Amino acid sequence: MSAGRVSSRRDVLRMGGALAAGAAIERAFAGSTGSGSILILGGTGFIGPPLTQEALRRGWRVTHFNRGKSAARGVPGVETLIGDRKGQLESLRGRKWDAVVDDTGFIPKYVKMCAELLAPNVGYCLFISSISAYASFAKPNDERSPTGKLSNPDIEEITNDTYGPMKALCEQYCADAFRGRVSIVRPGYIVGPLDRSDRFTYWPVRASKGGEMLTPGTPADPIQIIDVRDLASWMMKLVQSRTTGYFNAVSPPRAFTMGDLISASQRASPKAGTKITWVSEDFLATHWKADDLDLPPWSPTKGETAGSSLTSVASATRAGLRSRPLKDTVRDTLAWFQSLPAERQAKLRAGLDPQKEADTLRAWHSSQAHG
């Protein structure tokens, strides 16, 4: 594959053609199916806990490799190896596992270092990438769409511009190390309990506060998400069956809309009496800076992001990925957030600033009155 790019069907077939080369290594481990030992790089953040829980439920022996900061005392029933993928890999050397899930791979050169160390001693790898790896979102993507490319493969700074291409190069490094024994999972917006970003959480929380609530675009605008619990369960199915390939991991195109999200958020807080005001995309684009239009999981339906919420999930669906009802994710996310300490609830990390919301609503109503 060219650096950081899956540019054609040939690249995907090349990966599949390497299955035979990896068969001898895989036979040295637990076999092609069934539980065994699994290493999770990370394990204590957002994806890690439900992934760990699902692995334990299925009878896997779980090892975490992390810096020991998020869960200093470790996780019950789980072996913890302390280290840092930025070169401190001593605790991984000489160990064998049937499978590894890379939950913390962002900086390519460190992903490469870790993958090359583990590949001779691990039977199968699942790398968690991102749909941000794609080079463009002007049109809907599938797994054969071109991915971004870095001009400097050794870059470490993660920005809006580098994040996707860095993930794409991480994918390549994992695919090269675990030839024929790897799956690349590209989630979109991962949502649900434990989500520290508050991007999705903002909507049910805002709807619970009452008053007039600004919502962008129209109720029919598509959104794509994946509940972290659905993602974790499905990824363990891939691990269990040693499924290989590339997979977009989001809800099916047009399965959910922004209207569905807002309605579910209102129903989750029926006593709030929140009034919803839809403000057109064109109006927002005129009155806000371009970066302000980033209101996940909604995105503008025109221009550079026109296809971002229409990503194909046909491959993942065939491999068993399913999404729970949106109302369940909204309800559980709100309940989790409301269980957090008051000082944390007072500081949402995403969404609209209340003053900006009020100012925009005022300008919108004025434009409608004089329109």
Image (spheres, helix red, strand yellow):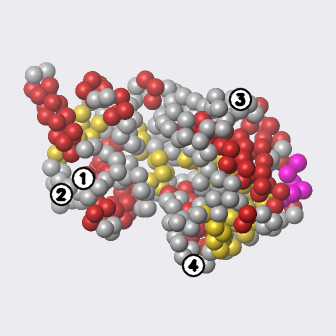
Q: Which residue was labeled with disc 3?
A: 8
Label 1 to label 2: alpha-carbon separation: 7 Å
Amino acid under label 1?
Ala
Q: Residue at x 65, y 63 (%)?
A: 83
Q: Residue at x 68, y 44 (%)?
A: 109
Quadrant (top left, top right, bottom left, bottom right) of the N terminus? top right
Q: Residue at x 72, y 43 (%)?
A: 173
Q: Which residue was labeled with disc 4?
A: 76
| Disc 3 secondary structure class | loop
Label 4 to label 1: alpha-carbon separation: 36 Å
- Which corner quadrant of the image does residue 282 belong to? top left
Label at residue 72: none
**146 and 150: which is toward the camera:** 150
Residue contact between numbered discs 1 and 2, judged by CB atoms under 8 Å: yes
Label 2 to label 4: alpha-carbon separation: 39 Å
- State whether residue 247 appears in this view: no
Pinpoint residue 216: horizontal percent, then vertical percent: 29, 36
Q: Residues within 10 Å of mark 1 (few under 14, many from 20)?
A: many
Upstream in the sequence, badge 2 or badge 3? 3
| Disc 2 secondary structure class | loop
Label 3 to label 1: alpha-carbon separation: 44 Å
Label 4 to label 3: alpha-carbon separation: 44 Å
Pinpoint residue 151: horizontal percent, then vertical percent: 64, 28
Q: Residues within 10 Å of mark 3 (few under 14, many from 20)?
A: few
Principal secondary structure, stretch drawn in magenta: helix
Q: Is residue 368 above or below residue 108?
A: above
Q: Which residue was labeled with disc 1?
A: 207
Label 2 to label 3: alpha-carbon separation: 51 Å
User: For residue 283: magenta?
Assistant: no
Numbered range of the magenta stretch: 21-26
